[in-house]
Image (cartoon, rainbow, N blue to C red):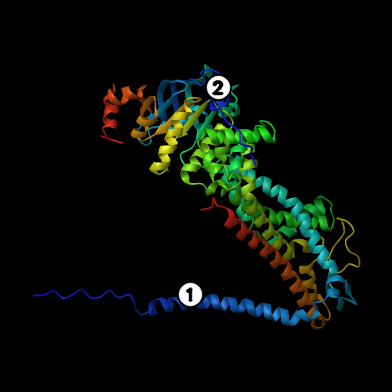
Amino acid sequence: MISKIEVNRKETLTKDGRRGRIEVEKLNLWFGDNHVLKDVTFDIPPNAVTAIMGPSGCGKSTLLRTINRMNDLILGTRVTGDIRIDGESIFQDSTDVIELRKRVGMVFQKPNPFPKSIFDNIAFGPRIHRMGGHSDIQQRVERALHHANLWDEVKDRLDDNAFSLSGGQQQRLCTARCLSVEPEIVLLDEPASALDPHSTAKLEELIRQLKQDYTVVIVTHNMQQAARVSDWCAFLMLGEMVEFGRTEQVFTKPRDPRTEDFLTGKFG
Amino acid sequence: MTTSPPPARKLHRTRFASSYRFWLLGIPLALFIAFIVYMFAYLFRNGLGVISWRFLTEPPLKGMTEGGIWPCIVGTILVTFVSLIFSVPVGVCSAIYLSEYAPANFLTRVIRSSIRSLAGVPSIVYGLFGVALFVSAMKLGLSILASGLTLGLMNLPWIIATAEEAINAIPGSFREGALALGTTKWEAIRHNVLPYAFPGILTGILLAVARTMGETAPILFTGVTYYTKQLPSSLSSKFMALPYHLFTLSTQHDQMMKVRPLAFGTAIVLLVFVLAFDGVAFAFRLRTSSSNKWQV
């Protein structure tokens, strides 16, 4: 069993200063002939929650998945423009996609725990990346679970199958798994869309905490959720960035009439 | 004026409609089961008498009118083993390539459907091909090796097809989840796909074993012999095998009626082998499908 260690989140997980700034510049993306993202330009600040919202099919998930280059897996994807993380382009020939995905973690729309024990789910990444011996891995697992607000619920059943957890717990488990390899940026792709309101509230609380240590980008079609959790807010429509700004500003004084129409429910 | 109450809804009605359909569909099945039961009963009634420890452990004696089938058991096991050594690694690797790495284009589709068709090619055709390739061209002669490779070739499409199916059944989210943690494609497959596809792959292999054991045609021209005094001493030896021994006893022997019980005994042993592997595969699938919580 793991010895109970006091975890100081600030000390153990904060990155040196404020890292994890993402600059998206004139990003265009095609799936085959389908022009999905059109000249998207915006800056995602570190240590903040940035929400990307917009109607279904507007390209918000695609934009998110471009940041850790998960779209590479889809055949016929073509990208122009640039995304820079801390000033470094992620589309260079020399870009190490493996390293990029370690730095840019991702939580998916549907909880996708692996059919392993809770412990092994979290230990999966650190083990593959050989991040230390058995006791190091144990500490990492415990730290990640603390950080995802899941430790107290699972500390006595780490050997249970992850599928025995509730949907909300599974999603926080997936968040912990993503944190276990110490990313700087956490991408969340509609993480609460499969959850009930209570689990959603717990997850949102977690998202607000994460920004202390990470750059958080969340995709959501739920504007109340964007208003609740985000500091910055981007509104995407038909692949175009219609508006980007502080969340209060976007919600109270939108500059673009299309944003206002979306927020007032004229379409959705 | 009062309205009459609505007629009571009938919860019970005659079951005739459903019952005649039951019989219509049930009788063919019952006939089939009866046929199988009869076949087994017939086999066991005629052959069980000769089955003894000596039958299983002695070679055929006195012009195959007495003695047992030990060399046939050994030969069948050896030749099946050789076929698996060839077909399992090649088959599983091909399946991994096809499901995970092959580009989704016309060529891949052609290859995939060719594999499916190859699985249906009559086994005697494999036998002929085995003579041409392994016995003659590769000069392996009539031998366990040539027969095993021929059987392996026959197995291969089946193993590729079932293994690919097992791999494709693993949800894409397992691969994606691993890749998002910064694993390489191979690490994602190795750690997060193959372990969960393994039961399905193994089931396919076990069924292939069961099928291989009973095949006669592929070994007929490539190394099996109706009688040898010695057990096979090397991979280049000829060998005896259960299905061919059964064929010899029941159609080629000059005292056919006298050796009939021995033929039935051989058939029982072969059947037990085949059913044992089928049964293991079945039990294995039952066990893993109940423990795979992700298979909803």
> Of helix, strand and loop, which one carries label 2?
loop
Q: Is residue A30 visible to us here?
A: no
Q: What chain letter is assigned to the residue under label 2? A: A
Check chain identity for marks 1 and 2: say if they share one.
no
Which residue does the numbered mark 2 point to in the structure image? A15
Residue located 74% across and 54% down the image: B84
A114 relative position to A133: left or right: left
Q: Are marks 1 and 2 in contact (CB under 8 Å)?
A: no
Which residue does the numbered mark 1 point to in the structure image? B25
Vertical order, A139 against B138 (above or below): above
Q: Quadrant of residue B282?
A: bottom right
Vertical order, B226 against A107 (above or below): below
Q: Residue furthest top?
A: A87
Q: Residues within 10 Å of mark 1 (few under 14, many from 20)?
A: few
Residue located 52% across and 29% down the image: A68
Q: Quadrant of residue B241?
A: bottom right
Question: Looking at numbered disc 1 in the image, what kind of residue is underneath it?
Answer: Leu
Question: Looking at numbered disc 2 in the image, what kind of residue is underneath it?
Answer: Lys
Vertical order, B189 against B214 (above or below): above
Nearer to us in this view, B111 or A243: A243
Residue located 72% across and 52% down the image: B87
A204 relative position to B120: left or right: left
Disc number lying in front (1 or 2): 2
Q: What chain letter is assigned to the residue under label 1? A: B
Residue B57: x %, y % from top left? 86, 70
B256 relative position to A138: left or right: right
Quote the CA–CA distance across marks 1 and 2.
Answer: 69 Å
Q: Is residue A150 visible to us here?
A: yes
Residue B107: x %, y % from top left? 58, 43
Residue A124's tag is none
Nearer to us in this view, A118 or B93: A118
Residue A185: x %, y % from top left? 51, 26
